[in-house]
């Protein structure tokens, strides 16, 4: 199939060797740029999201904020009275029936893990030093499935028995605490002390400076919510379904559901802007690739007019001539794509090996996923064919008698 | 002549009747170059088409070769009217009926002599069978190029290139070969050699030839001469051109 067309197309390309090599290199450069930028931005975004979500849940359920309702006087005929209100301070409150809620959430296919937690502000005290802290009470095993806490331990062993706690490594530095030392915790009027079992690096300095993780029961006592949970942290199978699920849960139950996108709205906006910019760059590069292939093939049609005329005189149909040039576009696109993907792999290798952070480690891990490479290559090949349409139509419509006379 | 005798006569290979060709139709500079000419060519005829430059020889050959459309008239190939067929039908008819030999050889420079000769089969069927390959080799050998099959046209002399073009035109054994000044670009010795080759192939294959030439020597050696002057056939008959 297409034996005649493919034979003539490859010969035409081989005949215009320099022209063919240049355009294949051009396509390869375009494909390499598209593949490299796509892999880079994908890696950068994945890294940013991983770091952001490394220390937070994909979705958090918490009690709705308490609202002071305006007192309404009984309206007399034709009049109404609105009373000004002042927002009330939000005190720690428990989610009602959270123990029943956990299995319901766990049964949802989108949900990978659920962890109840009690969070409150407080102070960590050691000797003369005291630091403002974010106290988090959790069940260690459940919480580990949300933020992989055990993997973030930089010193000690993650353990949350009664009277034990895990703290951020910068807070440990600020307080002069090491694993095994005791730290005082004060929340409101209640105080307790805990023995530090591990120091963790949560990836964000501010979190490392403020986080104190204690057993759920300890936090319940410190906050004054025996048996309560101020929130439920959820880890999802697909992080991008968080907003949809949050909307669904908020509509279904009387709780506040906050997705990680809502909690990091600026980050998400930045990522979106980045994605749009990348798409624009890719679009422009693909247009340049298409124009490059098209211009070379237009020149080729002009150069090959006599040969086209001979082929038509010999009995080549317009369809065969059309396919000869479409195939040339496809071949240039496919070869350029293959070369471009190899070039992109080399660029990624160079980035991974030569661009390093101050700690000597790669800034972040980027790889060219086979699916991405295939997609880029397929798009470039299709672009090659599309670029060839106009020159091919022109070739097919050449008047054979006139072409032979040239 | 009896009705029985008429029925027994073989149909001409091509019949042209009242052929007119105008350029720039409908424009102020419209010009008619063929003025209603008629002729037919039988199977196995070897005819020359002669005439001064500008007499319409190439236009007529292009019309016969289905490369150009006539403005008016009737053209039948093996009894089938081809005037009015669309491009695809004309192309298929051209492929099955006609072989071309041009003045400037018109071989594909990127293909070897053998590949040029196998192209018609490849074009027709999308592949070349071993038998077709053998046939192409045999035809090339018959035109004296058995040792040059792998050479590209650029590596061959003008006469050799024209022999490749003749081999290509004949490889699928079309009933009619149209040759437009096939020796016009060759020296006398090569010219004679190529002409002799065409006559030999004509004799061996019984292929009809219509040969446009300016060379009275060659015209004199054809079986029939059609002379075209100002778009009209002014002479049609056995060769009366004195061989130089």
Image (cartoon, rainbow, N blue to C red):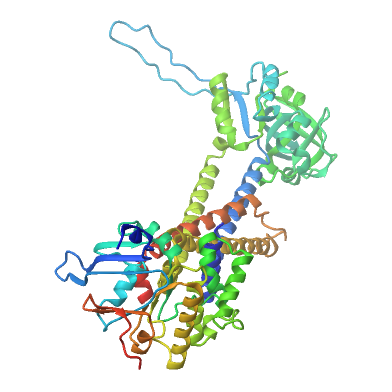
Compared to residue A168, the image places residue A336 above or below, namely below
Whether residue A86 is visible, yes or no, is: yes
Of residue A196 and residue A382, the one placed in the foreground of this image is A382
In the picture, residue A90 is in which quadrant?
top right
Could you tell whether A317 is left or right of A197 in the image?
A: left
**Could you tell me which residue is drawn at 72 percent across and 43 percent down?**
A171
In the picture, residue A235 is in which quadrant?
top right
Could you tell whether B45 is left or right of A105 in the image?
A: left
Q: Quadrant of the C terminus of chain B?
A: bottom left
**Could you tell me which residue is drawn at 66 percent across and 45 percent down?**
A204
Could you tell whether A175 is left or right of A338 in the image?
A: right
**Could you tell me which residue is drawn at 46 percent across and 22 percent down?**
A86
Compared to residue A86, the image places residue B160 above or below, namely below
Residue B187, image x and y in percent?
43, 92
Task: State the residue lying farthest toward the left.
Answer: B28
Residue A278, image x and y in percent?
51, 53
Of residue B48 and residue A296, the one placed in the foreground of this image is B48
Could you tell whether A84 is left or right of A173 in the image?
A: left
Compared to residue A117, the image places residue A25 above or below, namely below
Of residue A313 and residue A4, the one placed in the foreground of this image is A313
Q: Quadrant of the N terminus of chain B?
A: bottom left
Compared to residue A303, the image places residue A346 above or below, namely above
Residue A342, image x and y in percent?
64, 63
Of residue A384 and residue B40, the one placed in the foreground of this image is B40
Residue A59, image x and y in percent?
62, 31
Whether residue A316 is visible, yes or no, is: no
In the picture, residue A321 is in which quadrant?
bottom left
């Amino acid at each position: 199939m297409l034996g005649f067309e493919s034979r003539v197309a490859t010969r035409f390309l081989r005949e215009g060797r320099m022209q063919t090599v240049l355009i294949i290199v051009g396509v390869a450069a375009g494909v390499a740029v598209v593949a490299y930028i796509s892999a880079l931005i994908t890696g950068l975004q994945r890294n940013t999201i991983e770091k952001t979500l490394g220390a937070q849940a994909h979705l958090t359920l918490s009690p709705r904020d308490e609202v002071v309702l305006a007192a309404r006087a009984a309206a007399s005929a034709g009049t109404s009275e609105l009373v000004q209100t002042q927002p009330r301070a939000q005190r720690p409150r428990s989610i009602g029936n959270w123990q029943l809620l956990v299995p319901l959430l766990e049964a949802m296919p989108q949900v990978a893990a659920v962890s109840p937690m009690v969070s409150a502000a407080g102070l960590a005290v050691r000797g003369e030093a005291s630091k403002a802290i974010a106290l988090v009470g959790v069940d260690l095993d459940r919480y580990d499935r949300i933020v992989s806490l055990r993997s973030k331990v930089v010193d000690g062993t993650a353990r949350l028995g009664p009277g034990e706690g895990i703290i951020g490594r910068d807070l440990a530095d600020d307080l002069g605490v090491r694993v095994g030392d005791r730290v005082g915790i004060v929340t409101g009027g209640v105080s307790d002390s805990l023995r530090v079992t591990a120091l963790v690096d949560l990836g964000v300095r501010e979190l490392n400076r403020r986080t104190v993780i204690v057993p759920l029961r300890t936090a319940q006592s410190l906050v004054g919510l025996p048996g309560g949970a101020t929130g439920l942290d959820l880890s999802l199978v697909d992080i991008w379904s968080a907003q949809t699920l949050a909307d669904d849960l908020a509509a279904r139950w009387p709780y506040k559901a906050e997705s990680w996108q809502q909690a990091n709205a600026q980050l998400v906006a930045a990522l979106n802007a980045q994605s749009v910019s990348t798409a624009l760059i890719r679009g422009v590069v693909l247009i340049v690739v298409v124009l490059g292939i098209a211009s070379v093939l237009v020149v080729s049609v002009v150069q090959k007019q006599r040969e086209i005329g001979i082929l038509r005189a010999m009995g080549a149909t317009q369809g065969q001539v059309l396919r000869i040039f479409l195939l040339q576009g496809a071949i240039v696109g496919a070869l350029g794509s293959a070369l471009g993907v190899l070039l992109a792999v080399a660029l990624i290798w160079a980035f991974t090996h030569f661009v390093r952070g101050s700690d000597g480690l790669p800034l972040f891990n980027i790889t060219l996923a086979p699916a991405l490479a295939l997609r880029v290559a397929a798009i470039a090949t299709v672009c090659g064919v599309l670029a060839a349409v106009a020159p091919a139509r022109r070739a097919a419509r050449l008047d054979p008698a006139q072409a032979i006379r040239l | 002549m009896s009705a029985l005798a008429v029925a027994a006569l073989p149909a001409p290979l091509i019949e042209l009747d009242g052929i007119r060709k105008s350029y720039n139709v409908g424009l102020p500079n419209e010009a008619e170059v063929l003025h209603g000419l008629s002729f037919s060519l039988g199977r196995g005829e070897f005819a020359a088409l002669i005439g001064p430059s500008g007499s319409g020889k190439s236009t007529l050959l292009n019309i016969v070769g289905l490369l150009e459309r006539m403005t008016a008239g009737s053209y039948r190939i093996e009894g089938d009217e081809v005037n009015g067929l669309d491009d695809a039908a004309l192309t298929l008819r051209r492929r099955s009926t006609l072989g071309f030999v041009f003045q400037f050889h018109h071989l594909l420079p990127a293909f070897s002599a053998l590949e040029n000769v196998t192209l018609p089969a490849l074009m027709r069927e999308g592949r070349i069978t071993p038998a077709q390959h053998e046939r192409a080799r045999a035809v090339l050998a018959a035109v004296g190029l058995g040792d040059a099959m792998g050479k590209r046209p650029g590596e061959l002399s003008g006469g050799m290139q024209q022999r490749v073009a003749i081999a290509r035109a004949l490889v699928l054994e079309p009933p009619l070969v149209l040759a437009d000044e096939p020796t016009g670009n060759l020296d006398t010795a090569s010219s004679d050699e190529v002409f002799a080759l065409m006559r030999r192939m004509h004799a061996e294959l019984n292929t009809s030839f219509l040969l446009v030439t300016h060379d009275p020597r060659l015209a004199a050696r054809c079986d029939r001469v059609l002379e075209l002057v100002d778009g009209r056939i002014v002479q049609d008959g056995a060769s009366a051109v004195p061989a130089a």
